[in-house]
Image (tube, rainbow, N blue to C red):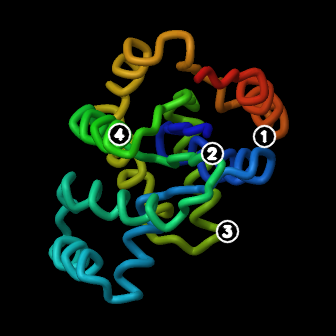
Amino acid sequence: MMNIVLFGPPGSGKGTQATYIVNSKKLTHISTGDIFRKNISQNTKLGQLASDFMNKGQLVPDQLTIDLLETEIDTYKNSNGFIFDGFPRTTTQAEAFNNLMVSKNMNLSMALFLEVCEDTLVQRLLNRGMESGRSDDQDESVIRNRIQVYEQQTSVLKDYYAKQLMDSFYIINGEADVKDISKKILSIVSNYKIFY
């Protein structure tokens, strides 16, 4: 089983690359945003709890996020592995996530970090806002604030996973051509050897 954490700032191309990896390696794509939306739309107990926080503009607590994640993992008993897109976001979440993996007798195979400079991110997100109509991608000050929050909370995961995974942590130039990024990631993933 191969399990991958893919992270990077907003606009770094996580969703695009996650889809590519999933299609190439037949992994299950896990996105916490998708999990929240699914559980809320299905009116599950955990979804109702998450909705209560989100409706107040609050972050969903880490333990509730982990509980939702565990429920989602359990629905894919025969999966070849998972790609975790944009989760964990903090070292606290990373530690809770590690405990969850241990409880499931699973290992994290690698972490991939997409590195992109702020000005490129802003331009990408503004372009996405024009194309998609997403309101959170149309105001440059809001975008820059999201990037700053990311830098404060999530960029520390680079150091965390560099220490935890050592040779299985990869920083990837997210400013390259999309196809070149995909080739680089596929090369890394394809060369991964599973040891029992």
Q: CA distance from mark 4 to mark 1?
A: 22 Å
**Placement of the N terminus among the 4 image quadrants:** top right
Q: Dot 4, how many residues are within 10 Å of its Cα: few (below 14), some (14-19), or many (20+)?
A: some
Tell me which label, 3 or 2, sits earlier in the chain.
Answer: 2
Per the model, the C-alpha gap separating discs 3 and 2 is 15 Å
Q: Are discs 3 and 2 less than 8 Å apart at CB?
A: no
**Comes first in the chain, label 1 or label 2:** 2
Query: Residue 91, image x and y in percent?
Result: 26, 32
On the image, the x and y values in percent for residue 8 come to 50, 37
Q: Which residue is mark 3?
A: 131
- In the structure shown, which secondary structural element does the residue marked by tag 2 occupy? loop
Q: Earlier in the sequence, mark 2 or mark 4?
A: 2
Three-letter residue code for mark 1: Val
Q: Residues within 10 Å of mark 3 (few under 14, many from 20)?
A: few
- The vertical placement of 163 against 39, above or below, is above
Q: Amino acid at mark 3?
A: Glu
The tag on residue 178 is 1
Q: Which mark is residue 150?
A: 4
> Mark 1 touching mark 2, by CB under 8 A?
yes
Closer to us: 104 or 153: 104
Horizontally, is 181 left or right of 99 in the view? right
Residue located beneath label 2 in the image: 13
What residue is shown at x 52% (from left), y 56% (from top)?
Answer: 30
State the CA–CA distance, disc 2 to disc 4.
15 Å
* Pointer 3 or 1: first along the chain: 3
Of helix, strand and loop, which one carries label 4? helix
